[in-house]
Image (spheres, grey):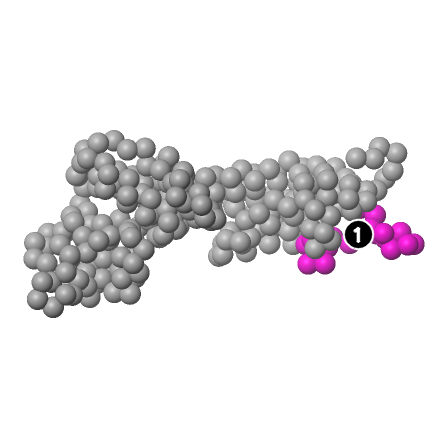
Amino acid sequence: MPSKRAYYRTSEVARSVGVHPNTIRWYESAGLLGPIDRDTNGYRRFSAANLVEAKLVYRATRVTWMSGVVRSTALEILALVREGALVEAATRIDQLVDHLNREIALAREALAVIAEWLSGFGELRSATTTLIPIRKAAHITATTADQIRNWERNGLLILPRDRHNGYRVFGDLDLSRLKVIRLCRLAGYSITAIRRLMAAVDQTPGGTALDLERVANCPTEEEKWYETFPTDVWISTLTRHRDTIDEMIPLIAKLKTL
C-alpha cells in the first residue's frame, strides 16, 4: 500500500481486501460503502477509513447468502458503519457471533442424536410395532408425505413396500430414521450431507463409535466430482463464517481511530 499518499486507488484497496477491483466497485454501486471522493479525472480516492470499511463489507457479505437473521444482521451492521454508529455496529457483531455459535451448537446436537441412535439408546424408536402408511408416518414425524418421498428419491432411506398394493410402509426403524433426517434438515444440513451421514451410519455396526463431525465435514470421493455447497459441510461453513464475522471487531476498533 502507498505510504506517501493519504488515499488509495481501487486496485490498491482490492489488493488489500483480497478481491477483484470490480468487487470494490460493486460494493460502492450497491451502497455498501460510505461516500468515496473522486479525482478531477473521475478516479476513486479511497481514504484510510474507506479501506477499513471495504474490509468490513468483504466479511459481512461472506455470510449474506444465508437467509433470515444472519443476512439481515450482517446488512444492518454495514448500515450502522455507514452511519458512523460504531458502538452499535460492534454490539450487533457480537450478537451475530453468538447467533452463529448457537447454529454450530444445534448442528452438533443433531450429530449427537445420530450418535445416540447409532448406539441403540435414547427415545428415537417409536412404540409402534405395526407397519403404517406414509401419511401416518408423516404425521408422527411432523413431516409431509412429499418430504418423505423426496428423501427416499435422494437416497436417505429405503422403504419397504406393502406386498399387496406396493405402497410404502413404515416400521419402528423407519420412523426413527425419519426423525433423525428431519432433525438434521432443521439443523441446516443439506440432503447431500445427510445422505453421507446416513451412509456412514448404515456401514457402521451398532454400538460402534463414529466420528460424525468428520463425516459431516468431509465430502466423499464421489461428491468431489461435483460442486460442494456450504450446507454440504455445514459445521465447517458455520465455523468459518463465525470466525469471519469475529474479525470485524478489531476493524471497528481501527475505524474508531480514523
Q: Main secondary structure of the magenta part?
A: loop
Residue sticking out furthest to the bottom: 165
Task: Tell me the residue at 74%/37% (across/down).
Answer: 257
Name which quarter of the figure residue 93 lies in: top right
Q: Nearer the viewer, residue 43 or 158?
A: 158
Viewed as shown, does residue 206 lie left or right of 216? left
The reply to whether residue 105 is in sight is: no
- Give the total number of marks visible in the rendering: 1
Name which quarter of the figure residue 144 lies in: bottom left
**Residue 130 position within the rendered picture, expressed as x and y whole percent measured from the top left:** 7, 57
**Residue 237 position within the rendered picture, expressed as x and y whole percent measured from the top left:** 47, 43
Name which quarter of the figure residue 14 lies in: top right
Viewed as shown, does residue 91 lie left or right of 181? right
Above or below — where is 70 with respect to 257? below
Viewed as shown, does residue 128 lie left or right of 36? left
Task: Tell me the residue at 18%/41% (across/down).
Answer: 122
Which SS class for mark 1? loop
**Residue 27 position within the rendered picture, expressed as x and y whole percent measured from the top left:** 69, 53
Label 1: which residue? 36
- Residue range in magenta is 27-47
Q: Nearer the viewer, residue 156 or 83?
A: 156
User: How many C-alpha atoms fall within 10 Å of the one at disc 1: few (<14), some, or many (≥20)?
Assistant: few
User: Which three-letter amino acid code belongs to the residue tagged 1?
Assistant: Ile
**Residue 29 position within the rendered picture, expressed as x and y whole percent measured from the top left:** 72, 58
The reply to whether residue 178 is in sight is: yes
Task: Tell me the residue at 87%/55% (across/down).
Answer: 42
Tell me, yes or no, whether the highlighted magenta stretch contains residue 181: no
Q: Nearer the viewer, residue 84 or 171?
A: 171
Above or below — where is 109 with respect to 39? above
Tell me, yes or no, whether the highlighted magenta stretch contains residue 40: yes
**Quadrant of the frame with the C terminus:** top right
